[in-house]
Amino acid sequence: MEPDSVIEDKTIELMCSVPRSLWLGCANLVESMCALSCLQSMPSVRCLQNTSVMEDQNEDESPKKSGLWQISNGTSSVIVSRKRPSEGNYQKEKDLCIKYFDQWSESDQVEFVEHLISRMCHYQHGHINSYLKPMLQRDFITALPEQGLDHIAENILSYLDAKSLCAAELVCKEWQRVISEGMLWKKLIERMVRTDPLWKGLSERRGWDQYLFKNRPTDGPPNSFYRSLYPKIIQDIETIESNWRCGRHNLQRIQCRSENSKGVYCLQYDDDKIISGLRDNSIKIWDKTSLECLKVLTGHTGSVLCLQYDERVIVTGSSDSTVRVWDVNTGEVLNTLIHHNEAVLHLRFSNGLMVTCSKDRSIAVWDMASATDITLRRVLVGHRAAVNVVDFDDKYIVSASGDRTIKVWSTSTCEFVRTLNGHKRGIACLQYRDRLVVSGSSDNTIRLWDIECGACLRVLEGHEELVRCIRFDNKRIVSGAYDGKIKVWDLQAALDPRAPASTLCLRTLVEHSGRVFRLQFDEFQIISSSHDDTILIWDFLNVPPSAQNETRSPSRTYTYISR
């Protein structure tokens, strides 16, 4: 008589060699089967290890005659008799095992189950895994509010994009409730407005920004309002993109009516105003909505060739060789810088630093503590012709000249870094941001450069005369030239060497009757100035319905303002 511990070990060993469908009592295989030691005590069953075949002691008697089945589980074979103890005995023994199991501590239960599982075959592991999977799944979005943790469920779902949020609403009523009460569509729109300039600008122009960023939910509309607003915003964005590509726009025109000589050399704008520098030596400030001239600043004795302003000051450069600083609100002259020997062709200022360049071939770097406290830090010399344009950030100062070169200087030390060569004639304009420099030249081409290695990434051809002004953002490049044309280019395609050259120019806008001197643009509009003494506003957002079906450029409506 074997000890009980030996019998238990053999019982477990036998259970592990039998398919799960047998020892869980599947009626289509055997009527019933005892568990644990009861199964071991069956006289007609014998287990052979290491994939050996189980045979009956009477080898002459066939399985058919003895009423036995031979079943294989892949690692061993078992001869199972049709006979098994009564269902009542099995149930009693199973209940007894469960009773003992329930009396153990959790750690003992886990240890026993681990021991049991370790003795099972791969086939059985698969069945157990299938059984456990749904038990391990948790609907945390439903469970968290039940524990008074609604805010955690809302915070988790707030990271979803619009497509995922739509899908989450369909999971069940509880998920839909969490999304609705958590105002998650409102939070999604607010997140987009914070991170995307297009969304921010659209919210201001369409007026739905008034419903955002409210501290109390009672201060605004319900979640359903934002749920229906989101697809309308997407439709607006798709329409704007289509208008850019198809050249559909609403055109507004300001006739500057210069007193002596015609031409608007430079401009900058914001939501409220446009500030322009004219060939007649004046600076004119225009209302962005009514297009009326609000103020005229005089003081320069030569054409105003360049300007930049912020919330405090306007800084202008002139062919009279001076740089003037004006109060942006009153128009009062605060400072006059006399350094360059010839016309000041371009300037930029930011974060207490200003850089100016001149026809005298030099670049001046200024420390700008305040409007009245501006001191010369360094003069950069190296170009062999007039320096037409400068740009800078915290790392580099970039300059372009009529000598056909672009030079890169260290912002912190003002030391020369490298020269970018490639243009066949003088360079009239450029913009620099991150690693990218985009330049326009009198060789009628636009070039894209990697500032870190000096490589030319792409040459854009299409203008018929000198490329006078250029700007770019994350999506597009907009250029203006002496041929009177403004071209819109696909920046991302231009940076892809596989993109065919024929696909790069998205649209050509023809409206100016003279050379295009300067332009600026954002997601919704281009504002350009010309030798024809006009400022044009190309509006790609507020396009009349009658123009929406047109696909050719130009498609436009007109507003004429003369002051």
Image (cartoon, rainbow, N blue to C red):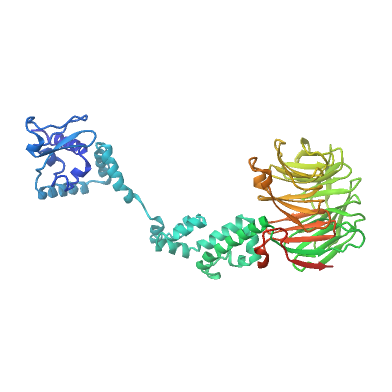
Total numbered badges shown on the rendered structure:
0
Q: Quadrant of the C terminus?
A: bottom right
Q: Is residue 257 above or below residue 139?
A: below
Viewer-proximal residue, 61 or 111? 61
> Could you tell whether 511 is left or right of 194 in the image?
right
Q: Residue 549 is drawn in which quadrant?
A: bottom right
Q: Is residue 533 above or below residue 383?
A: below
Image x and y of residue 75, in percent: 23, 33
Which residue is pictured at 19% across the width and 46% down the height? Answer: 24
Image x and y of residue 503, in percent: 66, 47
Q: Residue 378 is drawn in which quadrant?
A: top right
Image x and y of residue 154, in percent: 47, 59
> Could you tell whether 210 is left or right of 407 in the image?
left
Which residue is pictured at 11% across the width and 49% down the height? Answer: 87
Q: Is residue 292 visible?
A: no
> Could you tell whether 270 is left or right of 199 in the image?
right
Viewer-proximal residue, 239 or 273? 239
Viewer-proximal residue, 105 or 302? 302
Q: Is residue 166 above or below residue 118?
A: below
Q: Is residue 199 visible?
A: yes
Image x and y of residue 301, in percent: 93, 55
Q: Quadrant of the N terminus?
A: top left
